[in-house]
């Protein structure tokens, strides 16, 4: 430990951590992994660097899945990232600057949401699962909630709607069948114990063939006839038309309470947004905001700052500044030009590539089965080894294997990442060849 090389490591990592790393290395050598003194120093230094390196790392998403759940779903806009700097210090999170008294953090977003969607009330929590759990707990505890049997969804992580219902204290009443549920099924299920009708958007699967489903307008007619709430778990939060995905505006025409994710098609940070329409919806959202569970699932200042920036971009119509919107709207001709540029640069570096047609996916449980035409960069070489080498690079590049080839999709690579990607691909190919 008194030798110069280890003394330098002590300055950077501390005495105790260097001792532990050195002991681990000596134990490995005693087990047969012998190295010389310089090799020992190198390995101890590498172990220390790995121990303190951040676990959350930037990656380049060349998989072609826009809302990739494993990669953090929606990438934030530049304005949203810049807004985090404000939240990083002191802010007026819960201070009314006019009166000098305590304010409500919810008020910083509710007005913007009302302006964007034309609703009477709004509340933001930490994700959409929390939003629907809060709605059911605050509005329907001890009551029956009618749901179509075909909407008993399970999302990632074995998170099931029946479990959410059970946690909320509401009792689920299933109606219809897996493939067919009609307006009359809801009507016949209403009793004196019914508290609400719930539509759960089947965001991550499709049922096709001999199917029928009650429209939101038909469900609203039943709810109005019996003075019940209609709650719509919209899921993806589409603000404009994309395939057959229901939009927030369409839902607000009929529903009292609408919930959706902030980090899916809305293109912001992870959040659950609840909107209330009309007098009943506004009262329902107000009741949700005052429930004790609301504090447990509220958003922090970083999420609030990023979401506010995203809201202001949407209100101003600056959709091209939101990465998710830009990726979804990108014409295939633009993707092809980008892929061709990559192909030329990689060929100049001796990397074999081929351009092939393919499909990008929206992902995140949004518009399943709806692909976006794209052009893939297919790398020559062993697919699985290339994909692994790309993942282990700096920064890691996430590709996909298609037609037994390692492929890169330009649609999901952010602006400004092209040169870094090309360098990473060249390094990965060379490591596999060597």
Image (cartoon, rainbow, N blue to C red):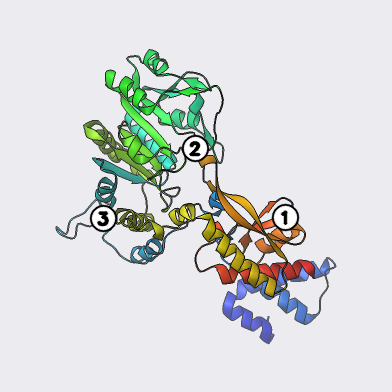
In this image, 280 relative to 68: left or right? Answer: left
Circles 2 and 1, Cβ within 8 Å, touching? The answer is no
- The one nearer the camera, 146 or 252, is 252
N-term mark: 1 or 3: 3
Whether residue 404 is visible to the viewer of this picture, yes or no, is: yes
For the N terminus, the quadrant is bottom right
Mark 2 residue element: loop
Q: Nearer the viewer, mark 2 or mark 3?
A: 2
In this image, 341 relative to 23: left or right? Answer: left
- State the residue at coordinates (47%, 41%): 243
Label 2 and label 3: CA atoms lie apart by 35 Å
For the C terminus, the quadrant is bottom right
Q: Is residue 141 above or below residue 346?
A: above
Crowd class of label 2 (few under 14; some 14 to 19; many from 20; radius 10 Å): many
Q: Nearer the viewer, mark 1 or mark 3?
A: 1
Mark 1 residue element: strand
Label 1 and label 3: CA atoms lie apart by 53 Å
Residue occupied by mark 2 = 203
- State the residue at coordinates (35%, 31%): 231
Residue occupied by mark 3 = 94
Name the spot of residue 218 as percent of width and height, x first.
35, 23
């Amino acid at each position: 430990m008194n030798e110069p090389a280890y003394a330098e490591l002590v300055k950077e990592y501390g005495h105790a951590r260097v001792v532990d790393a050195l002991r681990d290395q000596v134990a490995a050598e005693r087990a047969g992994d012998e190295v010389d003194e310089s090799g020992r120093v190198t390995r101890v230094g590498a172990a220390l660097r790995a121990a303190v390196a951040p676990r959350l790392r930037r990656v380049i998403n060349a998989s072609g899945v826009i809302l990739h759940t494993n990669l953090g779903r929606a990438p934030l806009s530049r304005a949203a990232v810049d807004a985090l700097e404000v939240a990083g210090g002191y802010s007026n999170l819960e201070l009314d600057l006019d009166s000098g008294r305590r304010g409500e953090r919810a008020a910083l977003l509710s007005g913007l949401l009302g302006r964007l969607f034309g609703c009477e009330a709004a509340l933001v929590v930490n994700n959409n699962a929390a939003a629907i759990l809060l709605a059911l707990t605050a509005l329907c505890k001890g009551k029956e909630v009618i749901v179509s049997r075909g909407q008993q969804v399970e999302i990632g992580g074995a998170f099931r709607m029946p479990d959410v219902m059970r946690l909320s204290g509401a009792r689920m009443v299933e109606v219809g069948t897996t493939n067919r549920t009609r307006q009359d099924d809801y009507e016949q299920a209403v009793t004196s114990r019914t508290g609400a009708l719930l539509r759960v958007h089947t965001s991550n699967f499709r049922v096709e063939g001999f199917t029928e489903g009650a429209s939101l307008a038909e469900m609203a007619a039943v709810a109005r006839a019996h003075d019940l709430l209609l709650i719509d778990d919209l899921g993806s939060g589409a603000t404009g038309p994309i395939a057959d995905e229901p939009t927030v505006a369409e839902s607000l025409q009929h529903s009292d309470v609408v919930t959706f994710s902030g980090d899916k098609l809305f293109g912001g940070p992870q959040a659950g947004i609840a909107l209330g329409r009309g007098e009943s919806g506004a009262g329902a959202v107000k009741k949700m905001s005052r429930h004790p569970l609301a504090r447990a699932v509220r958003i922090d200042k970083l999420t609030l700052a990023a979401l506010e920036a995203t809201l202001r971009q949407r209100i101003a119509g600056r959709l091209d500044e939101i990465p998710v919107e830009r990726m979804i709207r990108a014409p295939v001709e633009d993707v092809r030009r980008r892929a061709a540029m990559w192909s030329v640069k990689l060929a100049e570096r001796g990397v074999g590539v081929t351009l092939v047609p393919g499909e990008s996916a929206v992902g995140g449980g949004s518009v399943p089965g709806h692909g976006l035409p794209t052009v893939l960069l297919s790398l020559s070489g062993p697919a699985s080894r290339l994909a692994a080498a790309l993942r282990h690079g700096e920064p890691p590049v996430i590709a996909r294997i298609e037609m037994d080839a390692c492929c890169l999709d330009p649609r999901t690579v952010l602006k400004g990442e092209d040169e870094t990607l090309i360098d990473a691909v060249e390094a990965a190919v060379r490591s596999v060849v060597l």
